[in-house]
Image (spheres, rainbow, N blue to C red):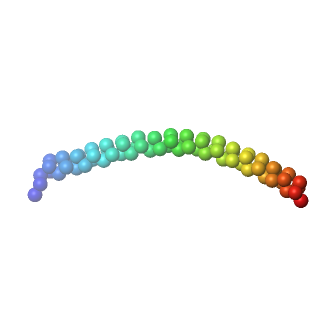
Amino acid sequence: MKSHEELEKKINRSLNSMKVKISHLHKSIKGLNQSFKGFHEDISEYMAFTAESYADHERRLSVLEKKIG
């Protein structure tokens, strides 16, 4: 049977390993959050541009349809 100290060392190694991985995960999530904010700004700008372009395109089609019809 293992001694208490051996088991404690094993558990502490596991805990330290988890702490390192959690720290890395935390940094990665922060980076993901920052990337998402940048993407959100870019996609919002793109969506506004697309909506504006679509409305302009619809107006041009409407004018052409009236001229043809």
| Residue appearing at x 55%, y 40% in the figure | 38
The N terminus lies in which quarter of the figure?
bottom left
Q: Nearer the viewer, residue 24 or 2?
A: 24
* Camera-nearest residue between 46 and 26: 46
Q: Residue furthest left?
A: 1
- Answer left or right for 69 relative to 22: right
Residue 23 on image: x %, y %: 36, 42
- Can you give x and y, in whole percent of width and height, for residue 46 in the image? 64, 44
In this rendering, would 16 be left or right of 65?
left
Q: On the rendered image, what quadrant is the C terminus found in?
A: bottom right
Q: Going 31% across and 43% down the picture, which residue do you hit?
A: 20
Image coords of residue 36 (percent x, y) = 53, 44
Q: How many marks?
A: 0
Point out residue 28 in the picture as x, y percentages from the top left corner: 42, 43
Q: Is residue 41 above or below residue 65?
A: above
Decide if residue 58 is on the left or right side of residue 18: right
Does 45 appear above or below 2? Answer: above
Name the image quarter holding residue 40.
top right
Which residue ends up furthest to the front in the rendered image? Answer: 68
Tell me if 40 is positioned left or right of 5 in this view: right
Which residue occupies the foreground of this view, 47 or 15? 47
Q: Residue at x 85, y 51 (%)?
A: 63
Residue closer to the observer: 1 or 17: 17
